[in-house]
Amino acid sequence: MELGLDVRKVGSHSVVDVKGEIDVYTAPKLREKLIELVSDGSYDVVVNLEGVDFLDSTGLGVLVGALKRVKAHDGSLSLVCTQDKILKIFKITGLTKVFPIHSSVDEAAGGAA
């Protein structure tokens, strides 16, 4: 399955809208996009997982790596996720303690906080 990535700005945050499946085949595309954003000076990133149908350990690794990159620049990486099947993966792995997980992009970007 294809992985769709759209980047937009919401306030001072770069929002990556992800659609499709994040797995061993598509995760490198997401990794490249996140590295590109940080390289371009975007240190406050929101990854919108609302359009994601599937997420495996490779995808989790990409997100953890991106978090380390933005933290190195005193930045932040927030996730938007309301789907139970995706949230369950973060709960099982304990990553809900690592990533701030929000129910909307506005909330994640600080608009509704």
Image: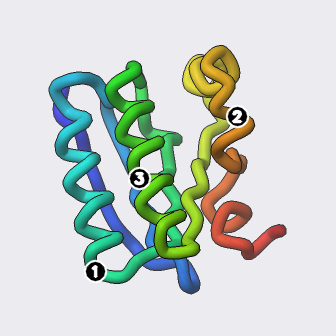
Left or right of residue 51: residue 95: right
First in sequence: mark 3 vs mark 1:
1
Q: Residue 66, labelled with which disc? A: 3
Q: What is the distance, in whole Å, between disc 3 and disc 2 at their CAs?
A: 15 Å
Residue positioned 19% across, 40% down in the render: 28
Tell me where residue 85 sits by quadrant. Answer: top right
Q: Are marks 2 and 1 in contact (CB under 8 Å)?
A: no
**Looking at the image, which residue sits at the far right?**
113
First in sequence: mark 2 vs mark 1:
1
Pointer 2 residue: 96
Tag 3's secondary structure? helix
Residue type marked 2? Thr
Q: What is the distance, in whole Å, between disc 2 and disc 1 at their CAs?
A: 27 Å
Left or right of residue 104: residue 34: left
Q: Are marks 3 and 1 in contact (CB under 8 Å)?
A: no
Image height of 70 relative to 53, above or below? below
First in sequence: mark 3 vs mark 2:
3
Image height of 77 relative to 63, above or below? below
Pointer 1 residue: 40
Q: Are marks 3 and 2 in contact (CB under 8 Å)?
A: no
Foreground: 67 or 17?
Answer: 67
Q: Residues within 10 Å of mark 1 (few under 14, many from 20)?
A: few
Residue type marked 1? Asp
Q: Position of residue 3 (x, y in %)?
A: 23, 39
